[in-house]
Image: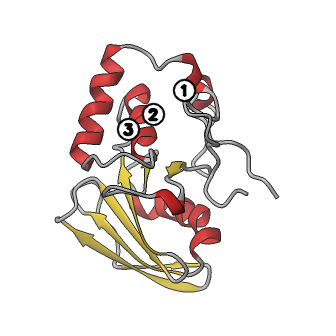
């Protein structure tokens, strides 16, 4: 069953719900750089946001065992959460700013750029798209700074508002086939 395309079209931003994470991943077979994708959560409430993110990732990752998060980016959270009948360890970290690392049994480790929830939509779009670019080797700080600069230069080109983005690659929610 196919999931609907995930697009960063500004008119769609108002229709997104918390149940549909704003997420884009690099192709698994062509992943380069520090992060394997980008995620723009709606709030800084880890426990709320994580349930929806893990639901999107679980079809790809199988059982999720651990999540390592930037403790400076999120409000305080417990050290464990139950997800689909399994206990997930939540581990705060200060060593990888603006990231969230998900460790699952099938694919190993997935590191995501976390775009702050209060980021301007055009900058968030640019950051998530760059983080999902298979050839991008930027650090998290560079991804966010470049996205902010690009957003200040003007709105994204019309072809980046389409589900396929500028390169024509499919922009589907994780787990879609």
Could you tell me residue 37's position as x and y percent?
44, 53
Residue at disc 2, secondary structure: helix
Could you tell me residue 85's position as x and y percent?
61, 85
**Residue placed under numbered mark 3 in the picture:** 127
Residue 48, compared with residue 122, is above or below; it is below
- Quarter of the picture containing the N terminus is bottom right
Residue 103, compared with residue 50, is above or below; it is below
Residue at disc 1, secondary structure: helix
Q: Are marks 3 and 2 in contact (CB under 8 Å)?
A: yes
Residue at disc 3, secondary structure: helix
One can see residue 41 in this view: no
Dot 3 crowding, Cα within 10 Å, few <14, some 14–19, many 20+: many
One can see residue 161 in this view: yes
For image coordinates 35% across by 22% down, the residue present is 151
Instruction: Give the mark, 2 or 1, whose residue is nearer the N terminus.
Output: 2
Query: How much space separates mark 3 and mark 2, taking CA atoms?
Result: 6 Å
Camera-nearest label, 2 or 1: 1
Could you tell me residue 123's position as x and y percent?
37, 29
Give me the disc on residue 125: 2
Comparing 65 with 150, the one in front is 150
For image coordinates 57% across by 48% down, the residue present is 18
Q: Quadrant of residue 62?
A: bottom right
Dot 2 crowding, Cα within 10 Å, few <14, some 14–19, many 20+: many
Q: Quadrant of residue 14?
A: top right
Q: Are marks 2 and 1 in contact (CB under 8 Å)?
A: yes
Query: How much space separates mark 2 and mark 1, taking CA atoms?
Result: 9 Å
Of all residues, the one furthest to the top in this rendering is 154
**Residue placed under numbered mark 1 in the picture:** 160
Of all residues, the one furthest to the left in this rendering is 95
Q: Are marks 3 and 1 in contact (CB under 8 Å)?
A: no
């Amino acid at each position: 069953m196919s999931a609907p395309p995930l697009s960063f079209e500004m008119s769609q931003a108002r229709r997104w719900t918390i149940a549909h994470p704003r997420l884009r991943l690099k192709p698994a077979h062509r992943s380069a750089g520090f992060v394997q994708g980008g995620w723009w959560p709606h709030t800084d409430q880890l426990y709320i946001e994580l349930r929806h993110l893990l639901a999107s990732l679980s079809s790809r990752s199988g059982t999720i065992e651990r999540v390592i998060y930037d403790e400076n980016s999120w409000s305080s959270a417990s050290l464990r959460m139950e997800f689909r009948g399994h206990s997930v360890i939540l581990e705060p970290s200060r060593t990888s700013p603006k990231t969230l690392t998900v460790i699952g049994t099938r694919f190993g480790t997935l590191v995501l750029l976390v775009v702050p929830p209060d980021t301007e939509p055009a900058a968030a779009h640019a950051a998530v798209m760059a983080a999902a670019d298979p050839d991008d080797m930027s650090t998290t700080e560079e991804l966010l700074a470049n996205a902010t600069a690009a957003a200040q230069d003007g709105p994204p080109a019309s072809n980046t508002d389409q589900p396929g983005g500028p390169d024509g690659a499919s922009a589907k929610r994780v787990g879609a086939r």
